[in-house]
Amino acid sequence: MRSYYIAGNWKMHKTVSESVALAKELKAQLAGCKEKLLVAPAFTSLAAVAEVLKGSNIVLGAQNMGPEEQGAHTGEVSVLMLKDIGVRAVILGHSERRHSYLEGDTLINKKVLLALKHGIEPILCVGETLEEREAGKLESVIGTQVKEGLKGVDAAALKAVTIAYEPVWAIGTGKTATPEDADAVHAYIRKVLAGLYGEVASKAMCIQYGGSVKPDNAAQLMAKPNIDGALVGGAALKAESFAPIALFR
Ligand code: 13P
């Protein structure tokens, strides 16, 4: 059976104690869940949440990382530090990083390669703004983000990569892409991947959808052939909304 990858991006929310409490609830409520599960708390909560998640079926992820292994990089957190405390995946190129912190494809690609080098699974986020979509640039924007983000990633390493399609206009707005619209973009991403890595690798790739995923739309989205999971923001902040998404079937 096809397995789905359901990830919760907690963004800049929750103190350590709030994060620990949510992780404990999720660990209990999702113990029997068959999907691949991930939570990505803020950096300050990672170590404490790692303790809670030990022995559970929930993978610990970070929301970002620095582009270098170590050194004089004030304010950055390194892949080595993340690995040291049990982080196994990292969200990279989130649109909030691209737009608020001006992260470009070259920097994001550097982080993708660094994560892979250290055995941390990247979730590479791509997505267009409303202006880009309305100007007919959807495919060129997404195509560039996928190709540039994966530059230098070889076919063997690709297996560790997940792509998350997050249309910027659907994030935190309550406006979900229709399952049909989202599936069409996922199909396009698969076409780009097929061009880079071949049909077989492209079919095997996990492509998550993100943008106002809620318990009441998760099943319709994931029923689509090209949608392999969800990257959840707002609804990931409470067990009562994240658990039903993870348990959508
Ligand atoms: P929302 O689910 O709040 O729209 O956020 C999506 C997101 O950005 C996940 O990374």
Image (cartoon, helix red, strand yellow):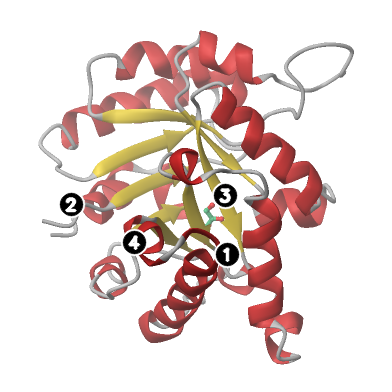
Question: Dot 4 corresponds to which residue?
Answer: 200
Numbered badge on residue 124: 3
Q: Amino acid at mark 2?
A: Leu
Question: Mark 2 or mark 1, which has the lower sequence index?
Answer: 1
Q: Secondary structure beneath disc 1?
A: loop
> How far apart in space, not on screen, are marks 3 and 4 (Cα)?
20 Å
Q: Quick one: label 1, few (<14), some, or many (20+) residues within 10 Å?
A: many
Question: Dot 2 corresponds to which residue?
Answer: 247
Please report contact status of discs 2 and 3: CB closer than 8 Å, yes or no: no
Q: In the rendered view of the protein, which quadrant contains the C terminus?
A: bottom left
Q: Secondary structure beneath disc 4?
A: helix
Mark 2 or mark 3, whichever is nearer to me: 3
**Image point 42% across, 59% down: which residue?**
207
Front residue of this view, candidates 181 and 111: 111
> How far apart in space, not on screen, are marks 2 and 4 (Cα)?
28 Å
Numbered badge on residue 171: 1
Please report contact status of discs 3 and 1: CB closer than 8 Å, yes or no: no
Label 3 CB-ligand 1 distance < 8 A: no
